[in-house]
Image: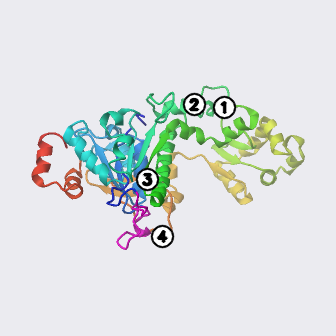
Amino acid sequence: MSDSTAASSASSASASAPTPSAPAPSAAAPGLSAGPLAGVKVLDLARVLAGPLCAAMLGDLGADVTKVELPGRGDDSRDFTPHVNGESTYFMLLNRGKKSITIDLKSPEGHALLLRLIEQADVLVENFRPGVTARLGIDYESVKALNPRLVYVSISGFGQTGPYAHRAAYDHIVQAMGGIMSVTGWADGPPTRIGDAVGDVVAGVYGSWGALAALLQRGITGEGQHVDVAMLDSIFSLQMVSLSQLLGGAGAPSRIGNSHPISAPMDAYAAADGHVVIAVANDPLFVRLTTAMGRPELIADPRFATDPDRLTHQQDLRTVIEEWTGAHSVDEIVTILETAGVPAAPIWDIGQVAASDHAAHRGLVKTVEHPVAGTVQVVPQPVHFSGRTDSPDLVAPTLGQHTEQILRDDLGLDAAEIQALRESGVV
């Protein structure tokens, strides 16, 4: 979710010096075992989903992520249910491994503190609506003179420029305007939202991807840059099948339920105890399917001879397939087709995925000890690195948990200065 909401190193080297500082290739720099972004400082000014996910993914790779929140309130997602001992599971998923400092950004003292943190940052992530950072005096143009090496990632609904840049955006909005709802659902039904917040998530992933590219370029040029990520652009770019139809001259595709616009049979089919997905993307796979079904004569049927033929006669083909699937359980079908080399699968809910042997082997879900929530589970980024031997810290912070530590260790404030800031409500 984005209100359309809310770190590159302020190293002592000048902007003209091409030596990279993220990470520095010095003898003191941590190796890959500590994560490929060890030594990189990320400042997370974002809230709710897209921006926090972007920063969390950088943290998963070893970056030191500091989340800036409002005193007394924090990120809006701290209120999202369900809660475990008062801590939001939504917040803990998206803010794993971060430190939290609370700062009143509208106060002069708070603004000054934030600028000092920006001076030290390698990457800054924000997802305010365009124009808000300028009013706060922390837009890219304002801070790049302070830290020319800063990689500044802005995630918004429609981008920093353009006719819709001023609009607020939530995942529902960009799914509606991005084309994906128009192809989701049944032909005789209404446009349908994809069941999870893919517009937010893909923008967060693209934001982290852009930050990594900008850090790599900074290592060559010594200069940071502004990375502008729009949720609408991101969800639009995902739709390879629909785009291939549109740009190939076939026009914008429409809703076709669970079937595929290019290949058949590729759909969900009724079994004796539920539904099974069968995915046949070419003629050799169709031969294997018909053999496994005990219907080899279908290979010579002119209705099913080629992929285009099968697309044209999908309903006839569905009838034939469901005569077979309807006589077997989902598990039986999957076993038969797996043995035959035909892609097939049961339809799992997210709980079944999380409880699967695959999830356990691949480490899709991690168990951590939170200081308030206790034992909780989180989901880190899923890419494995052969040279990495440690595990990233995946515990989300309580509100303002690291305020004193950051003010003391990163900004050099003494106890009296920190107490004065607390008493005045700045932190």
**Which numbered disc flags the more N-terminal residue, 2 or 4?**
2
The quadrant of the image that shows the C terminus is top left
Pointer 2: what residue?
Answer: 192
- Asked whether residue 196 is in view, the answer is no
Tag 2 near tag 1, CB within 8 Å:
yes
Q: Main secondary structure of the magenta part?
A: loop
* Residue located beneath label 3 in the image: 57
Q: Earlier in the sequence, mark 3 or mark 1?
A: 3
Find residue 231 and name its label: none
How far across and down, in percent of the image, does residue 109 sit? 19, 42
- Residue 185 drawn at (x, y percent): 62, 32
The image quarter containing residue 368 is bottom left
Dot 4 or dot 3: first in sequence order is: 3
Left or right of 227 on screen, residue 177:
right
**Identity, as a three-letter code, of the amino acid under mark 2:** Thr
Farthest left residue in view? 416
Q: Is residue 34 magenta?
A: yes
Q: Which residue is mark 1?
A: 255
* Dot 3 amino acid type: Met
